[in-house]
Amino acid sequence: MFGDFTAVNRISFDVQKGEIFGFLGANGAGKTTAIKMLIGLLSPTSGEGHVAGLDINTESEEIKKIIGYMSQRFSLYDDLTVKENIRFYGGIYGLKSDVLRKKYVEILEKVGLQESLNSLVGSLPLGWKQKLAFSISLLHNPKIVFLDEPTGGVDPLTRRQFWEMIYKASEDGITVFVTTHYMDEAEYCDRVSIMVDGNIAALDTPEELKKSFSAKSIEEVFIKLARGAENDDG
Amino acid sequence: MNQVVEISDISKTFEHVQALQNITFEVEKGELFGLIGTDGAGKTTLFRILTTLLLPDSGRATVLGRDAVNEFRQLRPLLGYMPGRFSLYQDLTVEENIQFFASVFGTTLETNYDLVKPIYSQLEPFRDRLAGALSGGMKQKLALSCALIHKPELLILDEPTTGVDAVSRKEFWEMLHHLKQQGITIIASTPYMDEASQCDRVALIQNGKILKISTPDDVAKSFSSTLYGIKSKQRFRLIQTLREYQFAKSVHPFGESVHYADRRGKPDTDELLNYLKGRGIEDATIQMIESTIEDTFMELMEEDSNG
């Protein structure tokens, strides 16, 4: 709760290991608040939660070590090079320098940035930056990675390359928790939850959601649910 | 005068980056014109030239009959511009912001209230709230109100819906249609392909070049091959396996299906399904589908980057 405003109201859900879990909601529906509670940046007013078996009320410092987080607005330092960003984040997570050296190669290959190791991150196109930020969020082999609108404004080809990286992470057993405003991307998730006014209004596989709302697409489901919302602002 | 914007052979370079290369196009009066491209394509540079905020290296831009370089003073009051980054005053309230923008253009909120009413009335319950405390969708509505308050003849909107949820995006475009009916010419850029289909005409822009200009329908239909939608529960494996198929031309995930084009034009669908079965994908179904703007755009992008 913020003042008299309940941002997230008694939500309950489970996410399975290796699952790609889509976390949808209108602007101001409470997505960011919920994510901040899960990654240990904010304590819930009431209720409990576990992330990879750790308690969000009492073990938030431990949680931070086993999760990766990438936000749309801020993820990398524009005035550092690609290499310096990797080294910086590797340092934060206590990676040894020989491990880091391997990681440079691995990440650059994965993202296709072999020639840009010494380029400033600020000079890269947005899509590359986002792919790089995602790889860096996986540096310390987290069990869960939280991606907050990773593909906003990214071109359609790079958006799809990004999703293939998500599929790969999921195949490797990493749980992916992702928010997006692109409703076609919601269809790429194993399950999708839709938040409206701080509540989870729907949660199921994309296929079942479409069936139960007699909708052709997740976008239709989303608009049906969010248009009914009272809290038009946040 | 029927052409609101006439751009001819505009180029602009920043240090080593050629932001715009010989761009030429026209926008007609009353048109809702979409500039479709992604981050770094050159959309913002083009908008800054149109709004007299940046000088082109070469070429000519005439906007509302005025030269964008030599007649910028006469031109500015006729333009409404909504930059991509939220550029209102976060520490002023909703009402203070709109009154400030009105006063800069020598008008008042009351004078042009009718024009902004459909949008601004939704913000009035929050008129005393600081702009910085609004949600994304509300910020965009306020920015649009401020860009409109002096009754411009041409409205230029730089990615007005990036980061905005699907419902607010829909409402925002409904407002644009309403403004178009009032005779305002609108140029809007967007990375969302579904918004492109709502424009009268669109220009696809990539690496500072225009790849195509036409109606949304025509762009969608100009995809070069027959397109198929293939579905399977094992989607990731389906994508990988299709890419390895010897006749695959393009393979892209699209919501619940994978869009597939074949190098032979029309594939032998039975053979393709057998190939998938042989690789362990037994539940695949295939169906001929109509191409969308996004299919065409990705095809043109791939051609462009392959030289």
Image: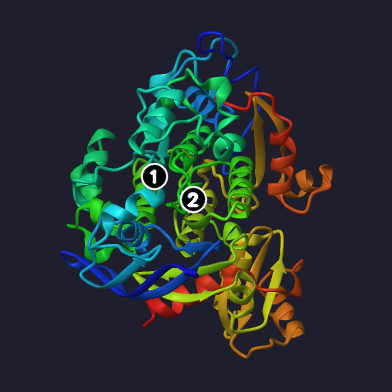
Q: Is residue A144 visible?
A: no
Among all residues in the image, which is located at the extreme bottom? B264
Q: Is residue B54 left or right of residue B87?
A: left
Q: Is the residue marked by circle 2 packed among few (<14), some (14-19), or many (20+) residues within 10 Å?
A: many
Determine which residue is flagged by label 2: A169
Residue at 39% across, 44% down: A138
Give the Cα separation between the discs numbered 2 and 1: 9 Å
Q: Nearer the viewer, residue B93 or B13?
A: B93
Which of the image's four quarters has the N terminus of chain A? top right
Helix, strand or loop under label 1: loop
Residue at 61% across, 58% down: B194
Q: Is residue A82 visible?
A: yes
Vertically, is A178 above or below A217?
above
Q: Nearer the viewer, residue A221 or A66?
A: A221
The disc at residue B205 is none
Which of the colour schemes (rainbow, by chain, secondary structure, one colour) is used?
rainbow
Q: Is residue B174 left or right of residue B96?
A: right
Amino acid beneath label 2: Ala
The part of the image, by quadrant, that contains residue B197 is bottom right
Amino acid beneath label 1: Leu
Q: To which chain does the residue with label 1 belong?
A: A
Determine which residue is flagged by label 1: A138
Q: Position of residue A113 (x, y in %)?
A: 29, 62
Residue contact at pointers 2 and 1, CB within 8 angstroms? yes
Q: Position of residue A39 (x, y in %)?
A: 45, 27
Q: Is the residue marked by circle 1 packed among few (<14), some (14-19), or many (20+) residues within 10 Å?
A: many
2 and 1 marks on the same chain: yes
Q: Position of residue B98 (x, y in %)?
A: 43, 31
Vertically, is B89 above or below B299?
above
Q: Position of residue A182 (x, y in %)?
A: 57, 50
Residue at 45% across, 46% down: A150
